[in-house]
Amino acid sequence: MRRRDPGPAIAALAPSVEALKRFGFAQFHGIYAIVLGEAHLLAGDAARAEALAREGLDVTRGAGYAFGVGFSQRLLGRLGSAAGDHPQALDGLESALQTFTGIGARFEAARTRLELATLVESRDDRKAAAVHAREALDAFVALGTPVYAARVRIMLERLAGA
């Protein structure tokens, strides 16, 4: 899926979500619903994205699939951010961070911290943004993910210069 054209992903994922639902593969059903929701968010259909995020949350929670729960929580945070609903965005991202941290998913926790840093920076809380960004940077460096580490360093430089 290219970032600017989620149409092919939507076309491919939609029947897969329905098939996985019919066959009772809960973990796959939930995660595919969440990824399809991400595609709908990119396409500008927030209502469909939210419905899929909530479906994914219900299914992955019911299956005990915490990794999927974290992804759905993060998508709900992204939806809040896209709608300008700061409390929903903060709740979704903080919930996702707690979930990913709780299962030891360090990379996803760091990605979520980076999104939290961006969110709180948009609310002019540079101090909190820097805390999240530094913690994300530490994780990305430890995990050997230089592209993400570079993104965070740029953010920290911007925060330091502001």
Image (cartoon, grey):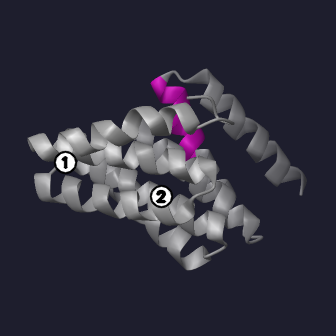
- Give the side of residue 142 with respect to residue 150, left or right: left
- The verdict on residue 139 being magenta is yes
Q: Nearer the viewer, residue 118 or 10?
A: 10
Say if residue 97 shows up in the picture: yes
Question: What secondary structure is the stretch in magenta mostly built from?
Answer: helix
Q: Which residues are magenta?
A: 135-143
Quick one: SS at disc 1? loop
**Relative height, residue 147 to residue 71 (above, below):** above
- CA–CA distance in space, label 2 to label 1: 20 Å
**Relative height, residue 142 to residue 57 (above, below):** above
Residue indicated by mark 2? 49
Nearer the observer: mark 2 or 1; the answer is: 2
Q: How far across and how far down the image is residue 146, in percent?
A: 61, 22
Give the residue type at disc 1. Answer: Tyr
**Relative height, residue 3 to residue 97 (above, below):** above
Say if residue 104 shows up in the picture: no
Label 1 near label 2: C-beta < 8 Å?
no
Task: Name the residue at the right extreme.
Answer: 161
Residue indicated by mark 1? 65
- Give the side of residue 74 with respect to residue 152, left or right: left
Residue 31 placement: quadrant? top left
Give the residue type at disc 2. Answer: Ala
Question: Which numbered disc flags the more N-terminal residue, 2 or 1?
Answer: 2
Quick one: SS at disc 2? helix
Residue at figure coordinates x 77%, y 70% from the top left: 124
